[in-house]
Amino acid sequence: MALEKKPRVLMLYDFPVHGGGSGAYVKYLSLALHEKYGYDIGIAAPDTKQIHPNIPLYPIKLPQIPVYIGRPGLDKAKKYNELTPREIANIYHAFIISALDAVEQFKPDLIHVHHVLVNAWVARFIRSVRGTKYIATSHGSCLHLISRDKRYFRLTSDTLRAATAITVVSGDTRAKLLKMFGSYLSSKTRTIPGGIRLASFPEERPMQKIRKQFGFDHDKIALFTGRLISEKGVEYFVKAARKIKGKVVIAGDGPQRKRLEEMVKTMNLTNVRLIPFLHDYEEFVDLYYASDVFVSPAVWDEPLGLTIIEAMASKTPVIVTRKGGVTMAVKEGVNGLFVRPRNSTEIANAVNKLFENDTLRRRMGERARAVVEARFTWKKIAARFDKLYRGSLI
């Protein structure tokens, strides 16, 4: 039986909230819990900007902010597998001091820690010295790092063992976590994906105005948005452009951008356009609606790409690789198409198939939207966490 009283929950996060898929998860889950369910929520993160006047931010002061695989705004940051033991210790120490300050000020009943690396070790420490229970969420990229750097394994293993509950964003992430740390964690591990705020994705938008705004003509548009890092496989989308019977639009920034620009120039591709990272979320949403298909050619096990869900909410069918947790949302021939990783020919063929069949493309887009409405809105996701939080404090 769950508690009637809603607990005070402190979100403990290891990146700036503004930027990245897991940051969006923290932000929109916090807003939904506060606005829809009346929760008192606090956020402790290495950030300086509040997401809501009634959701206090407790800045985490770190000597540096490392990354797992790359992140917008942190392009020059070290990766966790590049840190020295002393650097890891300094980050851990700084996190403990700032997180303890946040706990003493906010006085949470429960800590919800996002990612299962150093900040999760801090949640484990706080439970030891203060008794505050915690829930740990893996967004997938933290597991990707641990699988390649065993220095982080033992403390994370102990952290997961002591967690009151564990959540993961996809079935694929769940399988990886249990394989890595032990099937004994299965009973307390729940799969709760990320999602979108449906109000940001209306049924219809002024398409002609939006296409004019971006300078799109009457050609069909195949879109990618996201971090330009090698794991996203965007180079294969660029290679596919030679055979795509329409335009390719790539919106984002990252260490691969220069390489992609050089590829476009070397290959003399006149149908590829690179747009810088758009800081206005409304502009990103407009891009989804203005496009005919969305392409996510990831070459790593993406937990469940938020951009895929956003495109689907815009009634834009998706073309994706069968990597990671994407199969939770995409069904072959129903709301999207699958292609093999690193296969530019399959990408081009799939894009052209949808470009050439307006009826099929629209039908897939409608079905994509229906899947998001049924399973991937923050209101529905927050309801699951509401139940989990209250049940965790019995």
Image (cartoon, rainbow, N blue to C red):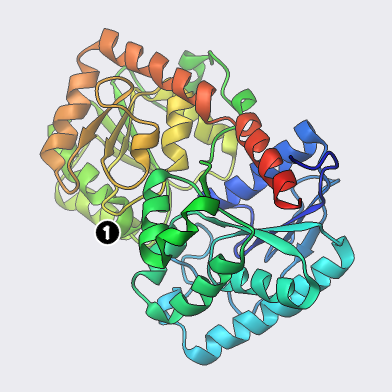
Question: What residue appears at the point 53 percent right and 41 percent down from the top-left corner?
Answer: 194
Mark 1 = which residue?
Answer: 259
Task: Judge left or right: residue 244 versus residue 26.
Answer: left
250 and 188: which is toward the camera: 188
Quarter assignment of residue 318: top left
Where does the N terminus fall, quadrant-wise? top right
Above or below 230: residue 297: above
Task: Judge left or right: residue 42 versus residue 223.
Answer: right
332 and 82: which is toward the camera: 332
Question: What residue appears at the point 28 percent right and 20 percent down from the top-left corner?
Answer: 219
Q: Using the rendered image of the protein, determine whether residue 295 is visible from the camera's viewpoint.
A: yes
394 and 39: which is toward the camera: 394
Q: Using the rendered image of the protein, determine whether residue 70 is visible from the camera's viewpoint.
A: no
225 and 198: which is toward the camera: 198
Image location (x, y in percent) of residue 274: 35, 44
Above or below 271: residue 251: below
Helix, strand, or loop for circle 1? helix
Question: What residue appears at the point 69 percent right and 39 percent down from the top-left corner?
Answer: 387
Q: What is the three-letter code of the residue carrying label 1?
A: Arg
